[in-house]
Amino acid sequence: MSCWVPVPEGSDFTLENLPYGVFEPRRGGGGHGPRVGVAIGDQVLDLAAMWAGTPLGADLATGSLNRFLRRGPREWAYVRAEVRRMLETDERRLFCERNLYRLDEVALRLPIEVADYVDFYASEAHAANLGRIFRPETPEPLLPNWKHLPVGYHGRAGTVVPSGTPVRRPAGQRAAGDFGPTLRLDIEAEVGFVVGAPSALGEPVSTGAFAEHVFGVVLVNDWSARDLQRWEYQPLGPFLGKSFATSVSPWVVPLAALEAARVPVPVQEPEPLAYLAEKESWGLDLRLEVSLNGEVVSRPPYRDTYWSPAQMLAHTTVNGASLRTGDLYASGTVSGREPDQFGSLIELSWNGEWPLRLADGSERTFLQDGDTVTIRASAPGVGGGRIGFGEVSGTVVG
Ligand code: CA
């Protein structure tokens, strides 16, 4: 069976992918407002219309995925299988065709109403690079806790914005007595995990229950003001240097689409405590690509990330903290070992010491007003196919 919707060669949105987003037709559309859709090729299928008149349809006719996500993994699997059947058979083809919109004729919204936002620090290469940059006097770049637990912090859910939202250069304290716009505006290329099914307060979620709670994956750009961050972060961690904007991609790729991308995480030594152990390690072979003003400046490999998403989730809840539908947690900057695999400008320019030279002849250490950063990613799909994530993009405004 094949898909009757044309899927152009190299498209991110194949039949094996079927990512979810929230869209609104730019014109026409009968004033229906935003609703949930699934991307296929260059189009989006209006799921609210496909289930119109049912309770599920009501949960899909809203401005976020949350009500659908709250239904849990059995319903996610049912809808995914049904959508696939709609796109492979002629049973409802005429009705489907009336509810397909071209992607260039819709506006994409933030896909989820973000409940809590947590950001980790799970890439060893990134943590080691920042250790070398910030603590050059100590021979060991990682802090003593780093290989014992996934280090993270709670971020600001209300400033998670969809791709395309302009990013205003934040002002703040850059050093003692020095207030002004950040002079060290940076990016962090990350992978984000969307929690669908909630958990009860007081009951930790085990690594084995990862797929019962986590629905899917988005791309994240954790914009960072390094001068603000450096001055404020001790002893309680990141605060205003991070909370002004976090951009996410509009399409949530379901975990179910990433079976062929599953790989073991790197060897973990020392062996993690029992609550962080996994029966089968759940790393993901996501290949990220970071572009600055259209030019690829880095290709970070997510598969090298030390802590798996299931371990990060187990750690988040080991104290009994409950999960809510719409929780988002991100991996932290994804960096590989090679200099062309670093996921932030502070690493790519080594704290500003080695400016990047761009194709137009200009140089960058940190971002200038007008700069546009775009992160894309792909993963292997079943049968040699490719799963694309679309993109998360943002332009800096002064
Ligand atoms: Ca981060």
Image: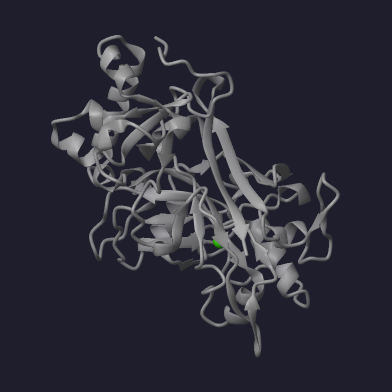
User: In front here: 10 or 212?
Assistant: 10
Identify the residue at horizontal 30%, vertical 32% (top origin). 29
Residue 147 in the image, given as x and y percentages of width and height: 58, 63
Q: Position of residue 339 (x, y in %)?
A: 77, 51
Query: Relative to 108, is 115 on the left or the right?
Result: left
Q: Is residue 396 left or right of residue 196?
A: right
Q: In this orientation, does residue 262 appear?
A: no
User: Is residue 333 found left or right of 198 in the rendered image?
Assistant: right
Measured as percent of width and height from the top left, residue 258 is found at: 46, 34
Q: Tell me if residue 225 can be seen.
A: yes
Farthest residue to the bottom: give it.
Answer: 177
Q: How is the image coloured?
A: one colour
Q: Residue at x 62, y 65 (%)?
A: 398
The residue positioned 74% from the left and 69% from the top of the image is 133
Q: Tell me which image quadrant ligand 1 sits in.
A: bottom right
In the image, residue 231 above or below residue 390: below
Residue at 76%, 72% in the rendered image: 139
Residue 166 occupies quadrant: bottom right
Q: Quadrant of the N terminus?
A: top left
Q: Is residue 125 left or right of residue 151?
A: right
Q: Residue 71 placed where, x, y %?
A: 22, 42
- Residue 46 vertical position relative to residue 209 in the rendered view, above or below: above
Total tally of numbered discs in the picture: 0
